[in-house]
Amino acid sequence: MRTKFRAYDGSSLSRMYQLDEVMVGGGNIWIIDEDSVAGDWIVNNDLELMQSTGVLDKNSQEIFEGDILEIQGIRMVVKFGSYEYIESSKSNGYTLGVVYDGLGFYVECINAADPDRISPFEPKTLKESAIIGNRFENPELLEGKE
């Protein structure tokens, strides 16, 4: 499977690129995007790269890092990196929580206040979600953290 990326240009252009190829080196980001003429490389150091998760949402849209998803009224943003999450279970009337370290894709709930708001990226569950935007083009969707 080929790793896919897209990129957001945070400069005055403020546009999302669907990338055909990416090369990073020497402090530069080189891209060939879907609009490049004859496969010309473009140098743009203001890009924010986002990797594909390899998972499609319920509308068959590819989920990328930075996407904002919604499932059963819960909004979450897809992130990549190291994270801590809590797995809770009930036993003899008590709720027990174990903190785990993770590395890779994860989701952070936006409109949930409980401590379990960060969780590993679970493709089986997230295939039932819908992409409603991304953190660059729709920052207003990130508001509402309780």
Image (cartoon, rainbow, N blue to C red):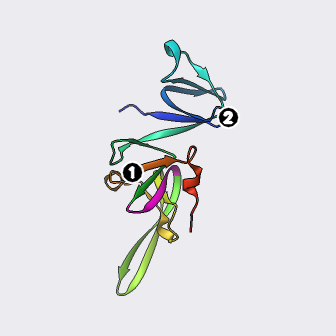
Does the magenta run of residues contain 77?
yes
Kind of residue indicated by mark 2: Ser
Determine the residue positioned at 53% across, 49% down: 81
Is any part of residue 102 visible from this angle? no
For the record, the magenta segment spans 72-81
Would you name the residue on which mark 1 appears?
130
Q: Position of residue 136 (x, y in %)?
A: 58, 44
From the viewer's perspective, tell me whether residue 7 is left or right of residue 46: left
Quadrant of the image for the C terminus?
A: bottom right
Identify residue type, mark 1: Ala
Residue 110 vs 68, above or below: the answer is below
User: What residue lies at 62% left-to-right and 35% top-to-bottom?
Assistant: 14
Which secondary structure, mark 2?
loop
Looking at the image, is 95 positioned above or below residue 36?
Answer: below
Q: Which residue is mark 2?
A: 11
Local SS, label 1: strand
